[in-house]
Image (tube, rainbow, N blue to C red):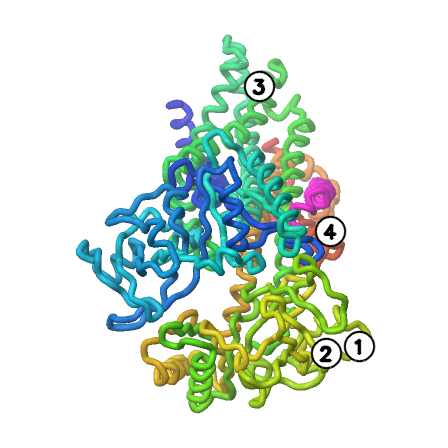
Amino acid sequence: MRYAVRALLKAPGFTGSAIVLLALGIGANTAIFTVVNAVLLRPLPFPDPDRLVRVWHVPPEKSFPGVKTFPVSPANFLDWRAESRTFESMSAYSTRHANLTGGDRPDSVTATYADSNFFNVVGVKPALGRTYTPDEDRSGAGHVAVLSHRIWKMRFGSAESILGKTITLDGNQNTIIGVMPASFGLRTWGATDADLWIPAAWDAKMRAERKNHNWAVVGRLRPGVNVNRALAEMATISRRLEMRYPEADQGWGATVIPLREQLVQDLRPALLLLLGAVVFVLLIACANVANLVLARTLARRKELAIRLALGASRARTLRHVLSETLVLSFAGGIAGLGIAHFGVKLILACLANQLPPGTEAGMDATVLGFTLAVSMVTGLLAGLWPSWKTTRADLNDSLKLGAGRGESESSRQFTRSALVVAEVALSLVLLIGASLTIRSLWNLYGVSAGFAAKNVLTMSVAIPKAAYPGSSSEISFYRSVLAKVRAVPAVENAAIIDSLPLTGGGSIQPFTLEGHAAVVFAEQPEVAVRRIGAQYVDAMRIPLLRGRTFNDADVERGNPVVLISESMANGFWKGEDPIGKRVTLSFVPGVAREVVGVVGDVKDNGLDVLAPAPTLYEPHAQTGGGHMSLVVRTKVPPGSLTRAIADAVHSVDRDLPLTDVKTMEDVIAESVSQQRFTMLLLGAFAGLALILAAIGIYSVLAYTVRKRLREISIRMAVGAKMGDVIRLVVLEAIKPASIGVIVGLAVANAMSKVIANHVYGVEPTDPATFAAVSFLLIFVAIAASIIPAWRATRVDPIQALREN
């Protein structure tokens, strides 16, 4: 190893080139692995985290096509908990926004309403005080709260005297009884990332509710019980509940998903795709370094032959060559750590809207171990083939080398060309993947969301039930707010909705149609339900296709009315005019609502969702609702009116916090952030691969031209023109590049399923993309051959013949 270091220091050009190539490949791999380790591999901060699972309802396929998991109703949860034997404990919870008032300013906080088993299930004790008891988790019991470490520190200055004090939450007085430790706030799981925890306190009516599914469930398996056993038991319990309560539970099943798998399921495919991409980059870097090492060992083959002649074994000679590549790879690994440090920051910035806030991805022992292992494997890959090829050369031929006689380059030229083929093939696969994601993102930005997003400002407003009891007070509040906001100069219109488009929120409810055959609750069709203000359709510029929108006559005690989307009209009133027909939402039985208008479809669940969900719009003026989003269409850039609009809201109630202030264009950008992240990083890796492939082609051609100077000189001496020489060298580049393109196309076609879930509006085997990328790589090969070809034509034939 010491000899290898000395030898490499004497060849700074070769050493520097190899280290840079390896650093790029190892650094990219380390950066991606660091994020993968932080998100997918790092253990959860709970005791025995592998025993923690999420338990879900599985809805009937007929009513919820394609939906695999669904929240749970309280009564079904209580039956699950009572009848299961594979679970040590089980808890139901719901996370929602609440208003914390009484201090210098109002705050919108996240509160997890959970039963008293919640803290036992996760297995974490409070850092201060205690958690609430079953007696405190009863309807009508005293209001208590457990604070998160974050809000205890930020709002209450980490004062231990906070225990026993009261806070005002949604107008109710809650006594603080405990503070959870800082490690409890797992940012990927909203149930633990809340600001405080409140008893669920179900009353008798809620405990008997089977039709309203609004609660999440977490369970802890008994020691030695695996997920498959729990799945089998939950299937048995679900069948029993179907038999007991066919009206509500017919067709409803249950599933069990490990908590870690649940938390990372959205990010896992993109991260694993990128991890595969950087492995391709590393292999290309290895091929480049292997070409450099091959050229270096060929230049030293007479020295190596002498060592063999003096008694050195082939294994010892092999170790002698490999030691140099290992030194290079470890040096490249150290340099790669520096590249990875900045790469991780870039990735976290790109993933800002996908990763939970505060995600820490640093160089821990696992990452360092990964870098060490990658460096060692890279050194072996880069050096094993060249050293093996050199040490297997004929000893007599190697000792006779001199003045160029007896030298045959065909085998070695084949080796170098094979490495170029591999580089081009790997680069083509990455470039095709990047091109498809770029086209996919372009297609997404071209998709109509169903509304005009420009010059629309949004913000969330939540009013406490204690201060605004009943729907009448809620309706009155928002009527006053909208009047104040519309009076702001440069505001064109303003309205409210309970869940903004593209955010995937809102409720899904079963319904029945007047004049259609009655079916049991479990088999009723479902529709997305949105609650909107009277001028929402106009403010968002959603097209009105038929009938009318809501107006001032649609009041709380007026004729119940609804708007429906085009997809709902086409799905349930084929060939009929839905205007005047009546719909009854099963959660509000006995209230038949008249359809007064049909509006265009809106992308509620994402731009990449092909089939828009059938949607029904209720007027807020008839139903009320405390937590709403304000949408304001402006005549000027919307950000400039944020302060004025906030002041207008606070002129009605100064204690209300305003959250999620953003433009509608920001909402759209966030909805495609994961696709944009995949495109950016895959594009960056593909660009790096293209540069490395060009370097590989150039280095092989430069070496080939040097070895063929005598032949080229003879050709020029007997009358070959400059164009003839350039054509000769360019053809040398095109041959392996063309083979690499063919191999790459076959590999890309075979791997098309891998990227199929990451593209939209374009086939993963799109012929135009495959052809464009193929021509690009051929062009790069030609461009990389220009400099060696030009140098070959500048050689004086007489001088070259004398030297050879």
Magenta residues, dominant SS class: helix
- CA separation in Å, label 3 and label 4: 43 Å
Image quadrant for the C terminus?
top right
Helix, strand or loop at mark 3: helix
**x, y percent for residue 163:** 21, 56
The residue that disc 3 covers is 391
Marks 1 and 4 sit apart, C-alpha to C-alpha, by 41 Å
Give the label on residue 765, or none. Answer: 4
Checking the image for residue 581, the label placed there is 2
Identify whether 191 is placed above or below 557: above
The residue shown at (57%, 47%) is 269
Task: Look at mark 1 in the image and give the residue it sits on.
Answer: 576
Q: Which residue is situated farthest in the top direction here?
A: 311
Q: Are marks 1 and 2 in contact (CB under 8 Å)?
A: yes
Q: Label 1, label 2: how many angstroms apart (C-alpha)?
A: 10 Å
Residue toward you, 168 or 337: 168
Which circle, 1 or 2, is nearer the viewer? 2
Q: Residues within 10 Å of mark 2 (few under 14, many from 20)?
A: some
Q: Which residue ends up furthest to the right in the rendered image? A: 575
Question: Callout 1, which amino acid?
Answer: Glu
Give whichever of discs 1 and 2 has the lower sequence position: 1
Q: Nearer the viewer, residue 352 or 50?
A: 50
Return the disc, 3 or 2, that comes first in the chain's sequence.
Answer: 3
Where is the N terminus found, in terms of image quarters?
Answer: top left
- Find residue 169 and name its label: none
Mark 3 vs mark 4: which is more N-terminal? 3
**Sequence order check, earlier mark of 1 and 3:** 3
Q: Nearer the viewer, mark 4 or mark 2?
A: 2
Number of residues whose C-alpha sits closer than 10 Å to that of mark 3, classed few (under 14), some (14–19) or many (20 or more):
many
Pointer 4 with pointer 2, Cβ within 8 A: no
